[in-house]
Image: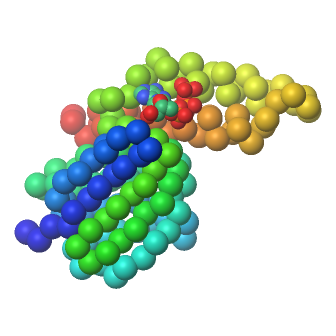
Amino acid sequence: MSTIALDIVTPERTVYSRSVEMVIARGAEGDLGILPGHMPLVTTLPIGLVHIKEEGRWSLVAISGGFLEVRPDRVTILAEAAELPAEIDVSRAQRAKERAERRLAEKGRADIDYVRAELALKRALNRLKAVEESKGAMR
Ligand code: ATP
């Protein structure tokens, strides 16, 4: 089985660096299924999940937005933050979700940055989804 090198890097650390069989990510213009030899491209990545097939098994990483670069032998994801499901603190994500929801519910307040709260909510929901999906995959 041919493979492609995948690196997922944040300003803090390398989250993933392995040879994989396939990467599925949501790019700016729709879903991308990346196999070895894929044509080169660069795209932004919204907050979402990246699915990875390695040695026949699927796993996933939660990405808090960034960039994806594909070269024929290498995929690089530069993310603002990224976590494997096992690294996600569910109660922290739950608290972040509730905090963001409270802020969004207070309409029309000049001191609330609604865009920031919306993004915080998306990150929190994405982390919770990552944990849920990874549990499903293990069943
Ligand atoms: P919070 O409000 O809980 O800090 P956030 O979405 O604002 O959440 P980020 O700014 O995206 O957090 O991330 C800051 C750092 O904390 C990153 O290294 C990220 O991987 C980590 N992180 C954030 N939330 C979690 C979580 N629920 N579990 C594990 N690591 C997390």
Q: Position of residue 6 (x, y in %)?
A: 26, 59
Q: Nearer the viewer, residue 72 or 34?
A: 72
Q: Residue furthest bottom?
A: 39
Q: Position of residue 21 (x, y in %)?
A: 18, 63
Q: Position of residue 135 (x, y in %)?
A: 29, 33
**Quadrant showing the N terminus:** bottom left
Residue that appears at 53% across and 22% down: 94
Q: In the image, is 12 to the left or to the right of 65?
A: left
Q: In the image, is 34 to the left or to the right of 97?
A: left
Q: Position of residue 84 (x, y in %)?
A: 32, 38
Residue that appears at 39% across and 57% down: 77
Please say if 118 is above or below 103.
below
Q: Let me know if residue 135 appears in the view.
A: yes
Q: Residue furthest left?
A: 1
Please say if 93 is above or below 55.
above
Q: In the image, is 132 to the left or to the right of 44?
A: left
Q: Quadrant of residue 20?
A: bottom left
Please say if 126 is above or below 24.
above
Residue that appears at 21% across and 63% down: 5
